[in-house]
Image (cartoon, rainbow, N blue to C red):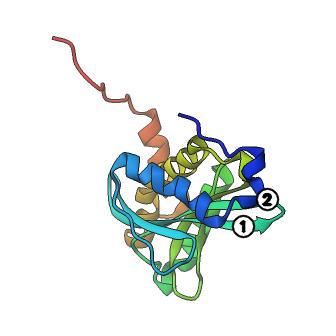
Amino acid sequence: MKKRVSKTDKTDFTEEAALAFFARHLDEQKWNYHRVGDGPTLFSGFNGDDALWDFNMCARQKGDGLFLLGVNSFIPNKARPEGRAACTELLSRINFELSLGCFEMNHEDGEIRFRTSIVLPAADITNGVVEHLLRSNLAIVDQRLKQIMAVLYSNTTPADALKLQEQKTESKPEPRFELN
């Protein structure tokens, strides 16, 4: 079900129309979301393997028919001042491995988030692009959250925290189902 914006609609395409792609995807998944005010941002939450966290989706017009679509996941725990240097190192190490998105930390208050975004012409915005942007964001946070929590709360070094992911990928995957 690929819905594309025709080239003739390009001039009428707005932030609201771009944001509607996110809303349709969430509606199809039967996910709850809300909007605060008239801004081009939707808010929701996700229940991952190890935690529940908030995320938002935004659509901003950048000019000349280009739109920024973004998803930001907010890690539920902030880094304490004494742990921010180690957390910064971990996030930098993780970012080096990523080909999509980046972790960021506000050094003033310790807030950690993960951002995925793309800038593209209105005519190239599809349900598939929106789904990929959202699902990639949530999957990466879910995959890396245990490492972040280890550095924040168990005095695990950033290098050792990365080994947690390596051990997980080296272990034999559990079967999805069993045959009798």
Q: Residue at x 66, y 48 (%)?
A: 125
From the viewer's perspective, tell me whether residue 157 is left or right of residue 63.
left
Q: Secondary structure at mark 2?
A: loop
Residue placed farthest to the left in the image?
180
- Inspect this view and state whether residue 121 appears: no
* Quarter where residue 60 is shown: bottom right
Expressed as whole percent of the image width and height from the top left, the position of residue 178 reads: 22, 18
Q: Identify the residue position indicated by label 2 in the image.
A: 65
Q: Residue at x 54, y 53 (%)?
A: 21
Expressed as whole percent of the image width and height from the top left, the position of residue 25 reads: 46, 49
Badge number at residue 61: 1
Query: What is the crowding at mark 2: few (fewer than 14 residues within 10 Å), some, or many (at least 20)?
Result: some
Q: From this view, report whether residue 119 is shown above or below residue 4.
A: below
Q: Nearer the viewer, residue 39 or 138?
A: 39
Q: Residue at x 67, y 64 (%)?
A: 14
Q: From this view, report whether residue 28 is shown above or below residue 78.
A: above
In three-dimensional space, the C-alpha distance between marks 2 and 1, rounded to whole angstroms, equals: 7 Å
Q: From this view, report whether residue 12 is shown above or below residue 97.
A: below
